[in-house]
Amino acid sequence: MKYAFIRAHRGEFGVRAMCRVLRVHFSGFYAWLKEPLSHRAQQDARQTELIRQAWADSGKVYGYRKLTDDLRDQGEQISENRVARLSSLAGIAAQVGYRRRPGCYGGKPAIVVENRLGQQFKVAAQDQVWVTDITYIKTHEGWMYLCVVIDLFSRRVVGWSAQSRMTTDLALLALLMAVWRRKPGNRVTVHSDQGSQFTSREWQMFLRQHNLEANMSRRGNCHDNAVAESFFQLLKRERIRRRTYPTRDDARRDVFEYIELFYNPKRKHTNNGMLSPIDFETRQLKLKQAGV
């Protein structure tokens, strides 16, 4: 395992230096390199590259649990323990947050609320609960950040925003699109994680002004926002990983096509009885009008 670690990091550190730190002889490492790899070692190398790609696609923020989900979506039969081991050897780790710069935030505390929704993702009508989250898309210009707002009832993306920076404005624009499109007459619960975009005073003020109620995942529990995570996995598997984006505008156009021209109006969803989100909402409206 030490030799595998040295091989994986040869581009970053000197071989002799790593051999000294790990207390192995460099001649033994080079002898190991010349030996043909066992089937197990070949599997390790192949799956490590898949893990590295999934980690890069996430903006280098996913931990081993989400990486395991990504690999299983690609058809890999792999356990969380194996992903954790290979990730550790390759120096892959989740991004758990950023250090605050003194004085940048004016001493304003984050606003966190409890998770009243739990993991109950079945709701009786549209515009009762919306879920929101942010993901990362790689372009040759750099990362593009995508925020979506999804109605739990139909799994329809009712709002989204894509920008070059992951700010509160990114999340607010997505939520503004949802409010403008749906114009809900009732109070809507908006579920998010505890990211800084969703714990800011600006976010909470927008919720109050538009008759929306905040609900938040428990810290570090990705399963609390599984519906948004599932959508991002679909988006990446069915579209993003099949494309190369020279610019953020190219990525934004492709996201528009996927959401507005395919996912919402056409993509069949098991939660909707194999109807698309729009078709499911249309059918439910007709049933309601018929008094069924």
Image (cartoon, rainbow, N blue to C red):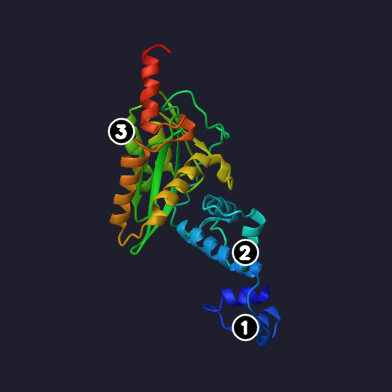
Residue ID for mark 3: 180
Note whether 108 is above or below 27 in the view shown.
above
From this viewpoint, is residue 277 visible?
yes
Residue at x-position 59% and y-position 45%? 221
Task: State left or right for residue 142 relative to residue 234.
Answer: left
The amino acid type found where label 2 is placed reads Leu
Give the numbered dot on residue 34. Answer: 1
Give the mark nearest the N terminus, 1 or 2: 1
Residue at x-position 38% and y-position 23%? 283
State which mark lies toward you, 3 or 2.
2
Q: How crowded is mark 2: few (under 14 residues within 10 Å), some or many (20 or more)?
A: many
Element assignment for label 2? helix
Q: Tell me whether circle 3 and circle 1 mark residues in contact (CB < 8 Å).
A: no
The amino acid type found where label 3 is placed reads Trp
Give the numbered dot on residue 179. Answer: none
Give the CA distance from mark 3 to mark 2.
45 Å
Q: Position of residue 29 (x, y in %)?
A: 65, 83
Q: Position of residue 282 (x, y in %)?
A: 35, 25
